[in-house]
Amino acid sequence: MPVELTESDRVFLHGERGDAAALAMRIVVEMAGVSGAERLIDVASAHVDGCLYHGLAGLEFAERLVAGGARVTVPTTLNVGYLDLLHPERYRGDEEIASNARRQMDLYVAMGCRPTWTCAPYQLPERPAFGQHVAWAESNAIVFCNSALGARTDRYGDFIDVCAALTGRVPLAGLHRDDDRRARLVLRLEGVSERLLASDALYPVLGHVLGKEAGNDVAAIVGLPADASEDRLKALGAAAASSGSVAMFHAIGITPEASTLEVATAGETVPEIVVSAERLREARGELDTAASGRLGAVSVGTPHASLAELERLAALLGTDELAVPLYVNVGRDVLAESDRRGLSASLGSAGVRIVTDTCTYITPVMEDVDGPVMTDSGKWAWYAPANIGVDVVIGGLEDCVRSAIAGRVLLDETLWADG
Amino acid sequence: MGPALVLEEPLSFWGGIDPETGEVVDVRHPQHGANVTGRILVMPSGRGSSSSSSVLAEAIRAGTAPAAIVLGEADPILALGAIVARELYGKVTPVVVAADPSLRTGTVATVTATRETARIES
């Protein structure tokens, strides 16, 4: 059954809005066919990932769009690029790649996208509203948008993201639809200590378990504390979108479409999995690729740090000196606020290396490390070994800071005991 | 057409495959070190990054991509990478869904597909 198109959709397809717009609509329509959507819907905004350089194909796609007169028709933010434009001296990679990467970033700005360069667009002043349809790419942003904000995006990737921005249209499919948003699986935390439930260290590890168990299904998590912060949900979702393809989860009593389990599952009976302290300990082992006490560096802020996380980092550091490099990745909008408050200056004096517009595991900005890198991010731990060739150890932010000061891996193991 | 490579777990193309060489670089993946170039890649589903479409398109451009991808469940992100590579380069890499293709690593198979249907023969 071919997808039903409006008069406006046809105007785009027939090239009346330009060649780039026609290509974009062709791709949206073809993707509608892939997902079996009956029709297209409008989106209120877009978050585009295609600005990150992966090789010539992505660059050539962007060139073709700009040559065809591409202009976004909805407010569009940009994900991290390959370069820290505010600290270019940090870059330690190939110059030709940097030049291609810069060109690709510039092309997306030329299309009218806002140069936000962040993987955490939900930390920008304007956020999608509950129930609002948007077209977001970037796996961690997708899961946060759906789960924590209750806005509606399907799992968009490079290419379709900008096509949605250029046309303002996406297939009515996947997580845009009520039925696809209900939980098909329950993860029930049992026998986990109160201390661990209250610690940020739990969330990337639990997210890793969620990714492994749910795959791309929507799951409901039972047993998280009602006051779990957005930053903790962010960490959970980012890990789940890496070890799995989670695009949405419910945290019962916390996220907006999950006041109760009955609501989250729409009253259906679904399979249940118990997540014990033992399973969480196993998950830590799956995320770690090194166990030694040696420590080469610490990297936090994946996804990009919030202001609250920067404040916590500064508080944990106090006046202590770092024995190994500590990097924090942050978006330039949050950085600007941090600058205004003098927080960036405090962190800088403490020796913290602030990285912006990009992330330490996707671009060569970290100095050669002599030992494993510790992180509080399940996503960073997942991708860094293959991307930048380091070993990783996962811990909470407190563990990371204590370790960075001591110059070796220090972990509070008591957190992970059976509760 | 090509020899099948069966992945026991889903694999993210971004961060999981090096498009310059076709090698599986995901350090935690059971088939870490295998090479997908010219293979009929069989896997339960996609995984992870929304940038996998770019990496697949880049692999197709570079000539390191699988000859076809057979998924247990649909992954629109991989289909997208193949669609755009076809737009840009005219190269066709079928991405199809088959719940139980009964292919083993090494078996030579042929995948032919239209927008609606696919045939896998070995």
Image (tube, grey):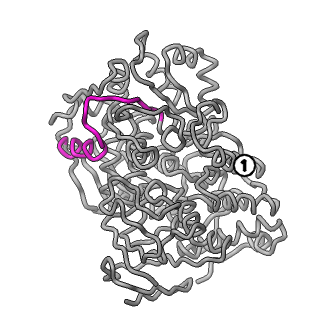
Against A305, is A148 above or below? below
Which amino acid type is marked by label 1? Arg
- Residue A144: x, y in percent? 48, 46
Nearest the viewer among A178 and A174 is A174
If the image is split into quadrants, where does the N terminus of chain A sit?
Answer: bottom right
Give the secondary structure at mark 1. Answer: helix
Where residue A303 appears, as percent x and y from the top left, is 49, 39
Give the residue furthest to the left. A418
Please tell me which residue lies in front, A166 or A68.
A68
Answer whether residue A133 is visible to the viewer in this image: no
**For residue B48, above or below residue B117:** above
| Left or right: where A99 falls relative to B76 | right
B72 to the left or right of A308? left
Q: Nearer the viewer, residue B58 or A232?
A: B58
Magenta highlight on residue A300: yes
In what quadrant of the picture does the C terminus of chain A appear? Answer: top left
Give the residue furthest to the top: A319
- Residue occupying image coordinates x 38% and y 50%: A240
Q: In this orientation, does residue A317 appear?
A: yes
Mark 1 Cα within 10 Å, few/some/many (few <14, many 20+)? some
Q: Quadrant of residue A182?
A: bottom left
For residue A379, above or below residue A409:
below
Q: Is residue A165 magenta?
A: no
Say which residue appears at 60% left-offset and 68% top-offset: B61
Instruction: Give the magenta-colored segment's residue range.
Output: A277-301
Percent from the top left, x then y, of residue A111? 76, 52
How many marks do you count on the picture? Answer: 1
**Chain of residue at mark 1:** A
Q: Quadrant of residue A271?
A: bottom left
Which residue is label 1 attached to?
A103
- In the displayed structure, A243 sits above or below A408; it is below
Percent position of residue A115, x then y: 69, 41
